[in-house]
Image: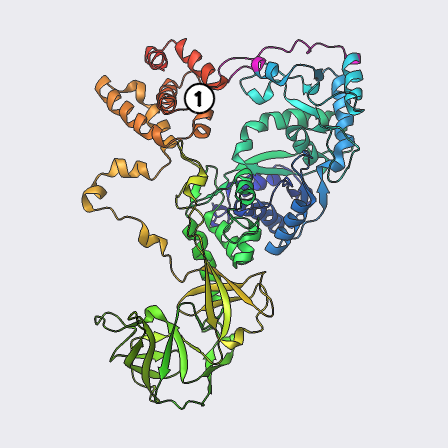
Amino acid sequence: MNEETKSLNFIEHIIEEDLRNGLPKEKLRFRFPPEPNGYLHIGHTKAIGISFGLGEKYNAPVNLRFDDTNPVKEEQEYVDSIKKDIAWLGYKWDKELYSSDYFHQLYDWAVQMIKDGKAYVDSQTSEEMAEQKGTPTQVGTNSPYRNRSVEENLDLFQRMKNGEFKEGEHILRAKIDMEDPNMLMRDPIMYRILHQSHHRTGDEWCIYPMYDWTHGESDYIEQISHSLCSLEFKPHRKLYDWFRDIVFDYSEKELPLPPKQREFARLNLSYTIMSKRKLLKLVEDGIVSGWDDPRMPTISGLRRRGYTPNSLKKFVETAGVAKRDNVIDVSLLEFCIREDLNKTADRVMAVLNPIKLVITNYPEDKVEWLDAENNPEDETAGSRKVPFSRELYIEKEDFKEEASNKFFRLKLGGEVRLKNAFIIKAENVLKDANGEITEIHCTYSEDTSRSIKGTLHWVSIKHAIKAEVREYDRLFLDEAPDSHQDKTFMDFINPNSLKIIEAFVEPSLKDANIGDRFQFQRLGYFNVDDDSTSDKLVFNKTVGLRDTWAKQKPKQNDNQNRQKPQNQQSQRKPIDVIKQLGKKYTNLPEEKQQKVKAEIQELAKKVNYDELQPLFGTAVKKVGTRIATILTLGVMLHNGLEKNDDINDFINKALEDKNELLATEAKSI
């Protein structure tokens, strides 16, 4: 295997194999298919980068298709924001398309499926359908309407389309297999009645296709070669292929290429939530100012905060394309923006927490315009002039009356260098009635050749421009704010995620434009916010010069470091550790089982229902995992989780199981 082949990710390996097996390269076509029901976030950047990156690698077209099948949640605002975000990232799509473009074709195919006995109109209530659908371990039962005649189904479906029925009276279902182990194959819904206006088709339709019916068929209509999606769609692949094969039989001559679905791991970020529904709650509850609030993980929020397209692309590239879900530390994202801005952002001087400094031996009316390098990392960046005068602002924390030899900033009797200017010595201070220092009096020396350890930034008071600086911190205090059973993500909101400061900046920034990025020397990277005007400059803090959060994490002592098994597990999600412990549970001696049981029950306190529920469908032969699941469920029920149909079904199945250990644990709850 050569180096080039080794460097391919698993999706590229799939494509290369398809090409070797006869797929013409000119038939390659990809797509990015967002639902226009919210703003794109950092997680979508990975999906965008994969699809458009493959387009660039293989010189293949990439469609931008909006899967707009739900008129209740979709708006033109979201369409516009998505297009803006993708263009800002630097990607160009071949065609702008909408699933709603295909509503007529989808309807015609659905009619053909009814005629072929592959779809039927069901008139049960949603509660009745849920009851007869079964569970992951119990087969479903057929609908009493499953064997309606073709004529009756066609008549009802036509009348559904004509608006003769209320919402919920009827649905169209595919006729597949109510005993299929994959519950998605148990006669899935294809159409529901919605008397809602669509953002593109208006009131033309009062029946709307479901996502699973629309998505793959849209891929097929567009002749997408590889339909790439995140891992949660892996169980949907069987249904994707079932629908695809049917319409392929109907339209093979006109549409000869059936698409292939493949899945990759989503991008999850620490200290962040990725759910559009939860992000919308932050907006609606006023926790943030909008979808583009610089604390939001949306692309528009990151753009407003000062992130660059290159930094986001580098982040996605570094995170890689994986087959398993994992959580990327947000510090990697911050590292990528630092790396990019270090090369591209001009250095300027700003003081965020000012204290007055007077150079007593400098003439009162004198002003010197000194040369300052714009960016030492960029030879072409040039230089600018900054004014120097008798009275300056420096940062308050850069001065102490008394300090140890390890304090390399300004102290009484000590010397520092002013950036791009002179060496000064602190002689005395003035204080107010409360003993607070109001002025630092210094003398300066024109001999700048001496070696001085400390260098401070400053601005001339006479020339300084007032500016509002918005210092942003992480929006959540917890690494996984939406993973707790007994709390919601709202419980971990950082109350200090935004601090508004009146700062002073050097006059070269007077004409800075919205979006311009700078390094405030010794402070961090900042950009000009959208709220900035000619009368009032507003800057956002993009990121500090170094990772300050790393210092806040508690360090383990040597004894803790020696406890490897427990510490290694704590680095993983509790639900993953529980699954691992369950695998070997039935093979353990009784004494060891009791220890593992106690460990699972302790970990269960950190698991939420959404993480546990998928394990209800664990295969019968994986008894250990099912025991671990029932143990975890017992703890959650004890702590206040309310039972639902899924939980009751899982417990009942466990009670009937041949394995005594599982049945015994089920009886206890």
Give the residue type at disc 1: Glu
Callout 1: SS: loop
**Quarter assignment of residue 204:** top right
Q: Is residue 457 above or below residue 202?
A: below
Q: Residue at x 66, y 8 (%)?
A: 144
Identify the residue position indicated by label 1 in the image. Answer: 642
**Quarter assignment of residue 101:** top right
Q: Is residue 412 magenta?
A: no
Q: Residue at x 71, y 29 (%)?
A: 208
- Which x, y percent locates residue 90? 61, 56
- Which x, y percent locates residue 570? 31, 38
- Which x, y percent locates residue 96? 71, 46
Image quadrant in which the C terminus is located? top left
Residue 318 makes an appearance in the image: yes
Horizontal side of 285 relative to 485 (left or right) equals right
Question: Magenta segment, principal secondary structure?
Answer: loop
Q: Residues within 10 Å of mark 1 (few under 14, many from 20)?
A: few
Residue 359 versus residue 269: which sits nearer the camera? 359
The figure's colour scheme reads rainbow
Q: Is residue 221 above or below residue 374?
A: above
Residue 190 versus residue 493: which sits nearer the camera? 493
Q: Is residue 135 magenta?
A: yes
Segment tinted magenta in the rendering:
131-151
- Which x, y percent locates residue 404? 21, 70
Q: Residue at x 31, y 25 (%)?
A: 601
Q: Is residue 201 above or below residue 87?
A: above
Horizontal side of 440 relative to 186 (left or right) equals left
Residue furthest toward the front? 433
Q: Is residue 152 above or below residue 476?
A: above
